Amino acid sequence: MTLAPGTRLGPYEILAPLGAGGMGEVYRARDARLGREVAVKVLPAVVSSDPERLRRFETEARSASALSHPNIVTIHDNGESGGTSYIAMEMVDGQTLRELLAEGAIPAKRLLAISAQVTDGLAKAHGAGIVHRDLKPENIMVTRDGFVKILDFGLAKLTQPEDPSGATQSPTVSGGTEPGLVMGTIGYMSPEQALGKALDFRSDQFSFGSIVYEVATGKRAFARGSAPETLAAIIREVPEPIGSLAPLTPTPLRWIVERCLAKNPDDRYASTRDLARDLATVRDRMGETSAGVAAVEPPARPGWRRALPWLLAGGLAVALAFRIARPQPSAAGEQPVRFSVVLPDGVGFESGEIEGHSALSPDGRRLVFVGDAAGGKRLYMRSLDSLETRPLEGTEGATSPFWSPDSRSIGFFSDGKLHRVKASGGPQQLICDAPNIEGLSSWGSSDQILFAQIGSEPGIYTVSAGGGQPRRLIYAEGKENFGMWPHFLPGGRRFLYLYRDFDRASDRRWYLRAGSLDSAKTTPVSDAIASRVEYVDRGYLVYGRSGALLAQPFDLETLRLSGEPVTLAERVYYFNGPATTGFSMSQSGVASYEKLPRPSRLTWLDRAGRELETIGLDGIVGSVRLSPDGRAVAVYIRDEKLGTADIWLYDLARKFPLRLTLDEGDDQTPVWSADGTKIFFRADRSGPPDLFEIPASAPGQDKVLLRLPGVQHPNDVSPDGRFLLFTEWSRKTNGDLWLLPLSGKVEPAPLAQTPFNETSGRFSPDGRWVAYCSDESGTDVVYLRPVDGGGERIRVSAGGGRMPRWRRDGKELFYLSDADQLMAVRMSPGPRPEPGNPGSLFHLEGEVRDYDVDVSGQRFLVDVAPPENAPIGVLVNWPALLPKENTR
């Protein structure tokens, strides 16, 4: 069946055909409800006409749609129209791996980058119990930006009969009669699939190994003259060694492929997550591996994996001491080396949205970062030729550290002021007042410091490093206009910065421009970079894009980029909203970068901390909010590549996710309305985040609720639905609690406004009190405050406390202690609550991002990520990754 343009399938209007295969025809279509383009796959008649197989299709499609992962094509919908069954999925602009292969050889580095993404997606699906069953180059898409998307997850199974004896037929056998067409699909089966046996996730590993073998060698692993001969080869024969066909293939990659192609599933990887980790390790250490020579032990050996962290954190760092200590450029012929910086016990690290959290000295010898410990945040120093990390006295509350050009002093921001301190220690020195500073500053060789300010009198400012009155260089009037991330060029007079006009709704781009201390004139540089940048003296501009750290040739005279960017590191922290990337460059061939936060795990726990059930929404998840009826949970899920988040709803009974916000901006902190029909959230559609609302049943139909100069995010809605409690962040009074009427005159009024941070507000079930946190004592403490504005305040937590949550009947209040103990406090009934003594329920391991309490107060839905003790990566001699003709 071929559909003509203009044909309607439910809400989808067919625009043009995209392709066809054993699993049906695919069309470009327009979703009339949301005004977006999607890909619509029309299923074969053999599926649509068989009620049992159609039922299985719908069940599996729901399971596949729950796979929220950047390397898996998202399934939006499935339905039936006029007897035609279809699925609607994410539209991907790119090429299949088969099409890329037709264009010529794929270099080893690119193969590793693609393979690592494929296995990340496979690991996600396999963890959810979904096996692909038809993995092949045609089902792997590579976008123009290098992202990998796996197609048709979980659907191959649906077009097959229940009888496993049919497993060698459709869809893996093409309907054509040409041997090439048949082998092009059969050739990626696992032996157990070819024999009609039961399959599990290890079958996909075999198919993956066949694909990588073909890409690496240019030859299919088991292709023979006919389909039966190919199946026999899959079952009985071992392919020709990769080393004999492609001797330049990295040896560790050969071992990985050989393990995937083991005939016995038990000899493959016991977990696809282990396969993904091994590939990521080889990819990240590619620069250390000479072509065709094994520079590391086989990734399949567990002992190697256990020993690696010790090598990286200990002996490797010491072995690099001599190389790092020399500030002269590293030779391009040397191998680059990567290792991670391990934090001291009790010190945490959190990548910031705008603030900078780490900085490498220009000579490449020392790293300074913001660490969070029991006494609060401060700066910590780590010499890269040492294993010791020490705190810098006098830097309490510091953010956004940056170095002087001579690597002897450090600038930082705290308490609305710009300070400096010697790297060797000593008292801090005030440079100037800077109440609205945002992002990293830059210290030039002319002994001037550049910084960006938003809010009141926004723009790019300069001030003498010795102190004085700042002078505004670049004006950015109004909330809609931003000048951010200034960075000095050599000579200390010219600089680069990012500019964005949020008032132009049709243009959401950042523009890289050049300015000067000596002139008000600015010069456009690029409109293709949405990241802070740093220049290195080898003639390269370094910036972030889609979670990768890139270096691209840059001419200081013409201020123009040229050539192709080179990837220095992947999975680097990137946040699209303020265009920030967590990295720092020295002038001695050393780079540091902040790693992406670890994926979290949503789990139901009982009052003893026992695990009851895991929710299938892993990834970088945050803001767990159960609906008023307890049937659904609202969260945000961050896209690792784009650095932005969207609001998702998850039906707890049907186990079905729904993406609620579709905008390209950053959407976070969902809060339910009292009746469960709306979601309030924060979004950065026009600058710093404002308050938005959206119907819980209408994806994409959001609208602005409140727009103020600062940063706002919602906390809670009163039980009667009359008020939204939100936090507003400002440089003058930090975090404050406000009440916003949801009917009548929408004008907010302050509930708690002091020079300290008041955050995490939650209404009591009777709506009379708000539980919240304040740090006026130096650490967060849980208090109660009346909603009617009275001055009374009741302390709840005995020591530090955060994330207060009420039981729905008001008889208990829960919070997290400083030691990540979940505490419970009995609350006496009546108009004035009387807190009892806090008692510990259980301890939570890892990074607790959020949690909520079910209606009964007997279960807790907890969002926890594994602790990250090595959050900063270091790359030594990164110029060795550059093309030889571009290396100075």
Image: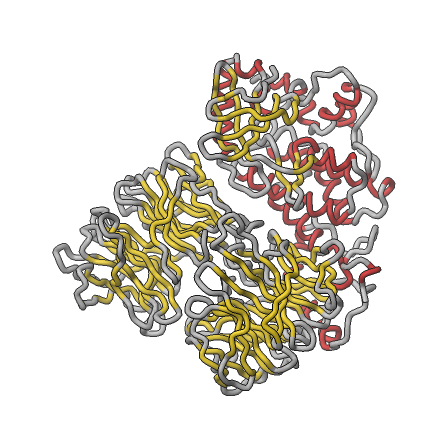
Q: Nearer the viewer, residue 501 or 207?
A: 501
> Which color scheme does this rendered protein use?
secondary structure
- Asked if residue 46 shows in the view, the reply is yes
Residue at horizontal 26%, vertical 53%?
A: 746
Q: Position of residue 370 (x, y in %)?
A: 51, 70
Q: Quadrant of the C terminus?
A: bottom right
Q: Position of residue 131 (x, y in %)?
A: 58, 32
- The quarter holding residue 388 reads bottom right
Q: Is residue 131 above or below residue 450?
A: above
Q: Quadrant of the N terminus?
A: top right
Q: Position of residue 862 (x, y in %)?
A: 39, 50
Residue farthest along the left direction in this orientation = 830
Q: Nearer the viewer, residue 72 or 473?
A: 473
Tell me if 147 is positioned left or right of 673 in this view. Answer: right
- Asked if residue 210 shows in the view, the reply is no
Residue at horizontal 70%, vertical 67%?
A: 316
Q: Is residue 170 above or below residue 413?
A: above
Residue farthest along the top direction in this orientation = 49
- The quarter holding residue 273 reads top right
Tell me if 448 is positioned left or right of 321 in this view. Answer: left
Q: Is residue 324 above or below residue 78?
A: below
Q: Nearer the viewer, residue 756 or 258?
A: 756
Q: Position of residue 745 (x, y in %)?
A: 23, 52
Residue farthest along the right direction in this orientation = 244
The image shows a total of numbered marks equal to 0
- The quarter holding residue 193 reads top right
Residue at horizontal 57%, vertical 14%?
A: 45
Q: Nearer the viewer, residue 430 or 456?
A: 456
